[in-house]
Image: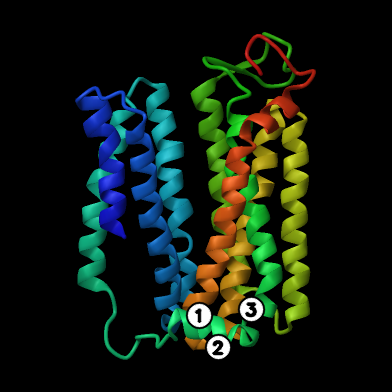
Amino acid sequence: AMIFMFVGVLIPPVLVFTLGWHWVGSVFIAYMLSGLGLGIFEVTFLSVITPLGKATKSWAIIGCPSGFATINILGLTLSSFGVPVVSLYWYIVACLPLGLAIFLKHAPRGKTELKTANFGVSLCQARQWMPSMVPFFAAQFLSHFAMENWPAVFYMFHPPKVPLFNPKSDEHLMKWGQFFAITYIFIFLGDSISRRIAIYLKTPSLRKRLACLGLAMAMIVVGLYLESLAIAIIIPIAIFMIFWGNGTIYGLTANHVDKEVPAEHNLASYSFWCFIGDLGAVLGGILVENTHDLFCRGHEGPFEC
């Protein structure tokens, strides 16, 4: 999985930035390889670390938003001061072999191994684990739709400035890169803190977990509504709510799988959960342009829409 990601990330800096390729297929191949790496790694990793306990998993699931923050907060800040974007790709390329080496050297072995059923067997025994996962599938679909639909807001604001209070105004402006660096800080805080809180929530019953899940989904819906107002100053709050909802869903799902899903079906439950989330992400990506046009109605200005 990490090799797939390494090759996928290597394509832009080598083929596009260094060799000057303009073949659009290179973008598809880069995304396909990176997606394969992420899809294989996330599901497998969440499953195999289950025997290591809640504390291990609570820290592990913060890894993704932490890496996201490194690129999108520090990277955007540096690029706003003139650091070439290709440097971010080379940074990721350098990190992946280091991460792989750390994993190979320090990954626990022996008695911590989780015995999982064959995927076909888990499907045949789906009645044992799938019904209770359905609400978590729906929540994952919504959260990934909202996250992958985020570029609709990203493209509303045109560099080099962002109007903070009035889309139609050329006053109270902020540098585009700095505005989105701050926005990504809110994304990181919402996603990472909520994951750690959610996995430790005391939810002894499925009803309580579903109530928390409903609140998380409501936060995402409210966040999407705030985005639709197209007022820059509230965008960080809106995106914080969306990613707090996402992190809560992530932590609650990990909590639920560990408590309610038989250990042998752990991998299958995570696989279906991530797959449903990917469907939401695909739909969110497809509708980016439609969402952009919807949010921009009546909000056109010199630096917006």
Tags 3 and 2 touching, CB below 8 Å: no
Disc 3, SS: helix
Q: Which residue is mark 2?
A: 262
Q: Is residue 230 visible?
A: no
- Which type of secondary structure does the marked residue at label 2 adopt? loop
Contact check, label 3 and label 1, Cβ < 8 Å: no
Whether residue 214 is visible to the viewer of this picture, yes or no, is: yes
On the image, which quarter does residue 142 sit in? Answer: bottom right
Nearer to us: label 3 or label 2 = 3
Q: Nearer the viewer, residue 113 or 196?
A: 113
Task: Indicate the amino acid at tag 2.
Answer: Pro
Q: Is residue 61 left or right of residue 208?
A: left
Say which element carries label 1.
helix
Could you tell me which residue is drawn at 34 percent across and 41 percent down? Answer: 30
Asked if disc 2 and disc 1 are in contact, CB closer than 8 Å, the reply is: yes
Vertical position of residue 161 compared to residue 288: above or below: above
For disc 3, the marked residue is 130
In the rendered image, residue 42, in percent from the top left (x then y), is placed at 43, 63
